[in-house]
Amino acid sequence: MKRGTFAKPAVVCRGLTKTYGSGHTQTRALRGVDLEVRAGELLMLVGPSGCGKTTLISIIAGVLEGESGECTVLDHDLMRLTQAQKTAFRAKFIGFVFQSYNLVPALTAAENVALPLLIHGVNRRSAQMSAHEMLEQVGLGGRGDTLPLDLSGGQQQRVAVARALIHKPALVVCDEPTSALDHRTGLALMELLSRVVLSGNRSLLVVTHDARIFSFAHRVAEMDDGCIVGVKESLATSTEARKEAVR
């Protein structure tokens, strides 16, 4: 997608706060976050460990409750939704790649990937076929019947990515998607995420410490001590730059 063609923001956070604990154990994870994610862009969120990145994306994805401020995602005011409404919202609109994968150990790779489709009422046979096709796209063709514990960390990460993409969500949120992958596999995975998500004019929000994948971003937002301290345009978002990175 060319620069300057984005529609209204997919995500708008204004003055968003989140506090854990109370009294002497109180920790202010978010201290009034202001952030926008445009429709159709790949935004990367960077910053030191413990600065609030995972808390922020978890609120945006509807996994955690925000405390105060504004968090509007895909025209839904998440601060006003009930838990049941938020669960339905996540199932329909959000794909989340957890850093810890969050695969169901008793289910095969294909069964894990098929879960979002089954939640949407797709019949089991069709969901399984789609899951195997999605696993093929992430380089795990032929491993659909394998249990998560029999896969490497990198393979489990790719199963988690396939599960996040299979229902074609409008917003995909990833927490360190390349952390368990070698250089080439990580770049190939980002190429896949970019192609699948952005070709559908969806949005992709990625938390990362991996500077090798910065070239895939349209913008990079820097976070520190619970606040967004700067957002800058990426210097290398051309197709040529991405191909060079994968080499």
Image: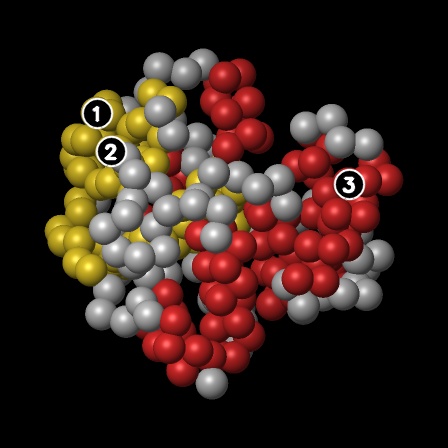
The residues bearing labels 1 and 2 have C-alpha atoms spaced at a distance of 8 Å
Looking at the rendering, which quadrant does residue 153 occupy?
bottom right
Label 1 sits on a secondary structure element that is strand
Looking at the rendering, which quadrant does residue 209 occupy?
bottom left
Which residue type carries mark 2?
A: Cys
Task: Give the residue drawn at x 28%, y 48%.
Answer: 5
* Placement of the N terminus among the 4 image quadrants: bottom left
Chain-order first, disc 3 or disc 2:
2
Q: Evaluate if marks 3 and 2 touch, with contact meaning CB atoms under 8 Å apart.
A: no
Task: Please give left or right for residue 62 compared with residue 219 in the image.
Answer: right
Which residue type carries mark 1?
A: Gly
Q: Evaluate if marks 1 and 2 touch, with contact meaning CB atoms under 8 Å apart.
A: yes
Q: Where's residue 76, x and y in %?
A: 38, 22
Residue that mark 3 sits on: 127
**Is residue 112 something that shows in the picture?**
no
Q: Dot 2 surroundings within 10 Å: few (below 14), some, or many (20 or more)?
A: many
Residue that mark 1 sits on: 69
Q: Where's residue 184, x and y in %?
A: 52, 79
Task: Give the residue drawn at x 17%, y 31%.
Answer: 15
The residues bearing labels 1 and 3 have C-alpha atoms spaced at a distance of 38 Å
Looking at the rendering, which quadrant does residue 74 occupy?
top left
Chain-order first, disc 1 or disc 3:
1
Task: Give the residue drawn at x 74%, y 49%.
Answer: 131
Residue that mark 2 sits on: 13
Identify which residue, 5 or 234, lies in the foreground. 5
The residues bearing labels 3 and 2 have C-alpha atoms spaced at a distance of 34 Å
Considering every residue shown, the one lying at the far bottom of the view is 247
Colour setting: secondary structure
Task: Give the residue drawn at x 48%, y 22%.
Answer: 86
Identify which residue, 174 or 93, lies in the foreground. 93
